[in-house]
Image: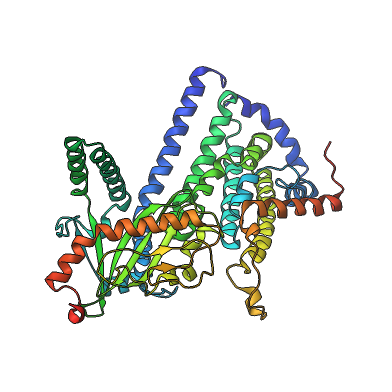
Amino acid sequence: MSTETLDKPTEAVVAKKSEGLLSKRRKKFISDPLNDDNPITIQVLGICSALAVTVKMQPTLIMSIAVVFVIVFSNLIISLIRNLVPNRVRIIVQLGVVATLVTLVSEVLKAYSYDMYKVLGAFVGLIITNCIVMGRLEAFAMGNKPYDSILDGLGSGFGYAWIILAVAFFRELFGSGSVFDIPVFQMIGWENFPTNGLMVDSIGAFMVLGILIWVQRSKTGYVEH
Amino acid sequence: MQQSNGYVILFTAIMTVVIGGVLALASEGLKEAQIKSIELDTKSQILGAVMDLGDEDDVLAIYDKRINSLVVDHKGNPLKDEVAEKVNILKQYKKLKKAQKFEAVAAKKEKDNDAAGAKEMMKKAEELKSDVALPVFKFHQEGDADNIEAFIMPVYGAGLWDKIWGYVALDNKLQVIKGVAFDHKAETPGLGARISDKEIQNRYKSKEIYNDSGELISVTMVKGENNSGLTDHQVDGMSGATMTAKGVNEMLKTYLGCYQPYFKTLKTGGGVAEALY
């Protein structure tokens, strides 16, 4: 295509520097979303699923894997075809790619982990509308090379994953008295651990998330303008 | 050139074909595994009403060895063409609900001295009911299909937020609940969602569905938790989930009622353990 020839000179310039596979610049793609630019706690995206799937650790883990998979591969695919995508329909194209990947995830879950499919069914489908995924495609993958896009996807995906896993850890611990369905309080001999119903409810997720954001921002010193 | 209408149309067309192809392939390729996992899920739910299944248990093998299923109509006659495992319980539930509505209208018309109207409504309800397929799963001893331990029936209803469903197992005398397995779509976690906990389901064990004179009164979950002085027809409730409990009660009553004609044929026909009759 015509634009490809236009792009080539600039790509060549970057290549000349022969950047390391994990150069400082690239490391930032991964490390930034984990903390300083976290999609959930700083950008406050993807809150819906962060509330919905974090009652227990196991579904949360599956959800995290699904989201990381979808972000990484949609970033890769969009980045590969970024010079072919007509500008006027780019959102539809991004949506198409994301929806396809999400549907694949959901079909695989249905086939090989039906229990998880029953728990997560609707929320896996909602990854399509997860702002983090679309946001990374539009903001990063449309303008960067495939390898960088994969790194960016990994960063954002894990940034999302560790937050919802942290939320789920506290919710399951205090709401059900277990971690990954292992009754930890019973194991240390605390038989009648008073479980907190609030933690099982979405409100519990809001509170845990709020505390997480508080702790994180007091450490990073991030202030909203 | 890239911004021309022709290019845009061509691009989207190709994208649609590629995406459609990928999804169609995935769907076809995974179909078998999906059907298998749904079957496994249904069968573990059915068996869940009578036994605790561990992770290592081969559900399908146990099911094959110990379950004999049939489908009956609302008069208790067996329907030979239906396969119990394939009956769409939601569809049957909708027919039942509609029939119940007609019956309610009929009762109202009866009150208003509109005998003809009431009769017509009853006829409509009857028509709907005669179309309902009711599956029964007979849980028998291994290798002895005549030695039935429990009759398992599906139940379906409405909770507070969305559908609830499950399986109820009655003992071989059709008197006492042997076990239940409930599940739900969207009951409140920690409150109504507790109906899927074994702890709640165990409360139904060995409760009686008939009173002393043989009338069906089902089993009701009472309001509040830690109640004392529960009768043989009551189970302790879940605090904060009265509406879900109401749905469960309604569901049990409706379905146990539906199966009464079939139970009667069993009792008179000698299909039930003779000790009692």
Where does the N terminus of chain B fall, quadrant-wise? top right
Q: Is residue A85 visible?
A: no
Front-most of residues B6 and B222: B222
Residue depicted at x 32% and y 69%: B169
Residue depicted at x 51% and y 23%: B8
In the depicted structure, whether residue A81 falls above or below residue B196: above
Query: As drawn, is B14 to the left or to the right of A71?
Result: left
In the rendered image, the residue lying farthest to the right is: A221
Front-most of residues B219 and B89: B219
In the depicted structure, whether residue B182 falls above or below residue B15: below
Front-most of residues A3 and A126: A126
Position of residue A13 measured from the top left corner of the image (x, y, whole percent): 75, 36
Query: As drawn, is B238 to the left or to the right of A184?
Result: left
Position of residue A199 measured from the top left corner of the image (x, y, whole percent): 65, 58
Position of residue B196 measured from the top left corner of the image (x, y, whole percent): 46, 63
In the depicted structure, whether residue A167 falls above or below residue B200: above
In the rendered image, the residue lying farthest to the left is: B269
Position of residue B45 measured from the top left corner of the image (x, y, whole percent): 37, 64
Q: Is residue A36 visible?
A: yes
- Residue B145, image quadrant: bottom left
